[in-house]
Image (tube, rainbow, N blue to C red):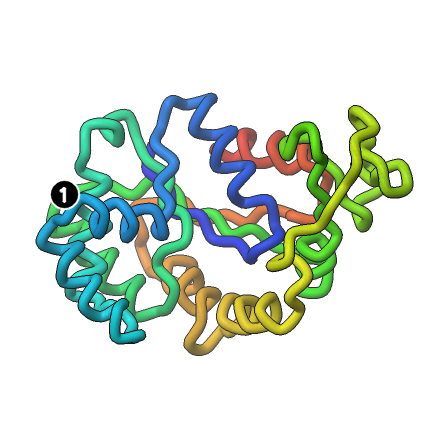
Amino acid sequence: MNILFFGPNGSGKGTQGKILKDKYNIAHVESGAIFRDNIKGGTELGKKAKEYIDKGDLVPDEITIPMMIDRIEQDDCKEGWLLDGFPRNKVQSEKLHAALEEKGIKLNYVIEMLLDRQIAKDRIMGRRLCENDNNHPNNIFIDAIKPDGDKCRVCGGALSARDDDQDEAAIDKRHSIYYDTETGTLASSYYFRDLKDASFKYFTLNGEQPLPDVTAELISKL
């Protein structure tokens, strides 16, 4: 089962990806980790990417696409993979799709997580971390996991907020890229949605639901 997964920051896409990884024994492939692993490992593609990154430039698709293909051809992806965080624009979608077809790698599903932009922003800014366990779910904007004042709803530990979760300008910048239907990530997703005679299934998920309901909808559509 090979999947492309689109969704804005704050949608819970990463959480759903981990659930699918565990349930179906597929690799959850995050684009950011691919860059880090190639650069840390000193691969030829990593060296080339680092030259651009060190100059503050975007890594060109001619390097990025082969890096993605190389990753999903590794042994841990033999049972399937879920690619998260790439592609980010329509051109990258076109190039990735062409590369997959050239390699004979079948794409089975393209998933788009639907979530209102303001709700996505609130979810990010509402996240709170427990001093005892960061995995304890606490969010001041989600009723089901709303903390007990300034205490963790699970264990009563003190809560804090990550600095980047409170950086409204940075969140707005990332969301402006994602929600752009002309040149941004949604344009990338819509490339697959609008393909004629596609061999894969494209479907959407209602990201406003509680997490278990999103999971149930997701699994029912696979």
Does residue 86 appear to the left or right of 221 in the view shown? left
The residue that label 1 is drawn on is 104
User: Which amino acid does the dot numbered 1 rest on?
Assistant: Gly
Establish if 66 lies above or below 30: below
Q: Quadrant of residue 71?
A: top left
List x then y, in percent, for residue 108. 34, 40
Q: Residue furthest right?
A: 149
Establish if 45 lies above or below 169: above
Count of marks placed on residues: 1
Residue found 29% across the figure and 72% down from its top: 58
Q: Which structural element holds mark 1?
A: loop
Does residue 8 appear to the left or right of 193 in the view shown? right
Few, some or many residues within 10 Å of mark 1 (<14, 14–19, 20+): few
Q: Residue furthest left?
A: 44
Location of the N terminus by quadrant is top left
Does residue 74 appear to the left or right of 177 in the view shown? left
Residue found 49% across the figure and 32% down from its top: 18
Residue 99 or 123: which is nearer the viewer?
123
Residue 169 or 200: which is nearer the viewer?
169
List x then y, in percent, for residue 205. 59, 46
List x then y, in percent, for residue 35. 28, 53
Residue found 48% across the figure and 37% down from its top: 17
Residue 67 or 187: which is nearer the viewer?
67
Q: Quadrant of residue 64?
A: bottom left
List x then y, in percent, for residue 195. 34, 61
Does residue 134 appear to the left or right of 42 in the view shown? right
Residue found 18% across the figure and 68% down from its top: 51
